[in-house]
Image (tube, grey):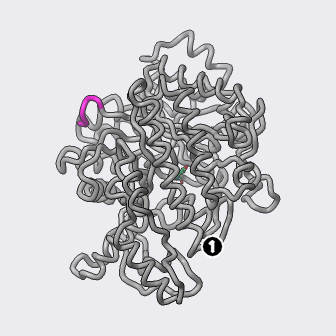
Amino acid sequence: MFPQDFSWGVSSSAYQIEGGWNADGKGPSIWDVYTHTPGTMPADANGDVACDSYNRLDEDLYMLRALRVKSYRFSLSWSRIFPDGTRSSLNQKGVDYYNRLINGLLANKITPMVTIYHWDLPQALQDRGGWENVDMIDIFNDYCDFCFAAFGDRVKLWMTINQPHSIAWLGYGLGTIPPSIKNPGISPYIVAHNLIKAHAKAYHTYDDKYRTSQGGLVSIALNADWIEPKDANVPRDVESADRALQFQLGWFAHPIFKNGDYPDAMKWQISAKSELQDLSESRLPSFTEEEKNYIKGTADMFCINHYTTKVVTFATGKLSPYSYDDDRDVLETEEPDSPTTAYAGQRAVAWGLRRLLNWIKEEYGNPQIYVTENGVPSPFPITIEDTDRIFYYKSYIDEALKAQNLDGVNVKGYMATSLMDSFEWMNGYNFLFGLHHVDFNNPNRPRTPKRSAHYYCQVVKDNGFLTVGHLQLHKLVGLRAPCGSSSISTDCLAKIRSASSVESVSNL
Ligand code: NOJ
């Protein structure tokens, strides 16, 4: 079992669930603009309505309460609060929505864990150069300052930015997500530099203006695969695996959790490559001593999003064109012995989570760790048995438990991704991570618990695994009525609410 105060939760993000893309004065984000551009998305999918959570707050609260989770990780839509990205455009109706959500959570004894920015940059700020523009540091700080002031009396767990690695590399390197900039050897490093400084500035704002009165915790949600050396007896493979982790997680975690600066492996690699490329200076920007001191220590807990494990061996990267990918000098492959998932390349490798948690413990001095995302997609259409997802959660949570109980890793919480099926970025609605099914063809967007919701609810109730996990799994999969019968629509909600206590609702 986990410690009594263990924070069981589920996660979501604004653009993936809210819909209401232009409701009540909301401004467009880069995702609105991108998905509205013909030909960009499979089946022209977009987040215009998504799960319609902007209009279905009660349904969301109902699901959360029924799951018995202790916390809910969600994000704020920047352009719903500041339609043009800046304070002068303040949209009170957007603020009201988040107040209703936060108050609803607290009324149900669910702790809000708020991501301030989860990829949906206001388009107006992209028009000013987005994260390549150094002005973003102050602009982001002002937005965070506003959020702390508006919600910080009730929100005590903050994450400034979700997966800065994805923003820098996918958004500005590969260009596979908006703003779709393909400059793989230069822009990601500039963007990451600005993101790290923006995070640090927001952290200091919290320290200077809010910590004494509000007493919350501020961090950043980083993401990492576990990287296993191809042959643990080959030192070069082991070094390569460690270097790959430094390039992915250490890029952000090393400055923030260690010494204010990038990992040595990154500094060395990129400077050596830049020299071979006849550049007068490294493509990796550097921090001044003052900046290092300012950045170091700007997180109160370690928030990690984790999905899969990769296997790595040494391979000399190309010099042209310049690329972060080639700067690493690694060859990455799938972990061949583990089950495949709907996502190509994302095997379900539960033991990788335990190793990653241990690596974080050793590398960053035993911080408090929240697993802020973990989950598996199923392709559309879903099967109601949902055994793959149950297996994934069971095996991954078990490894988190081993890390906590046997290895002494300070794991404080676990957020299953995600509360419900939602807009899965570039995959539209084709890959679905939800514990609840959402019928996207129905204007009421009814939510239906999958078997995995039953299972996760039991894990939360038992604070881990009370008996031999397999027995529970049998009980859940074998004995309960199909959850398809308990679809949640707006109509039946009122009935459920008046007829059921939290206790009975939990028997999903
Ligand atoms: C990470 C992102 O933070 C989240 O929004 C997304 O749903 C998951 N990856 C799954 O791809």
Which residue does the image show at 23% across and 57% down from the upper left?
A: 362
Q: Mostly what secondary structure, the magenta segment?
A: loop
Q: Which residue is mark 1?
A: 183
Which residue does the image show at 39% across and 49% down from the upper left?
A: 391
Q: How many marks?
A: 1
Q: Amino acid at mark 1?
A: Asn
Q: Residue 45: horizontal and vertical position, in percent?
A: 73, 52
The boundaries of the magenta stretch are 1-5
- Is 405 in front, or is 258? 258
Q: Residue 40 is drawn in which quadrant?
A: bottom right
Is residue 24 magenta-colored?
Answer: no
- Residue 57 appears in view: yes
- Is 452 in front, or is 180? 180
Left or right of 459 in this view: 188: right
> Pointer 1: residues within 10 angstroms few (<14), some, or many (20+)?
some
Left or right of 83 in this view: 285: left
- Is 227 in front, or is 454? 227
Q: Residue 282: horizontal and vertical position, in percent?
A: 48, 78
Above or below, 328 relative to 406: below
Left or right of 163 in this view: 228: left
Which residue does the image show at 43% across and 87% down from the upper left?
A: 316
- Residue 339 appears in view: no
Placement of the N terminus among the 4 image quadrants: top left
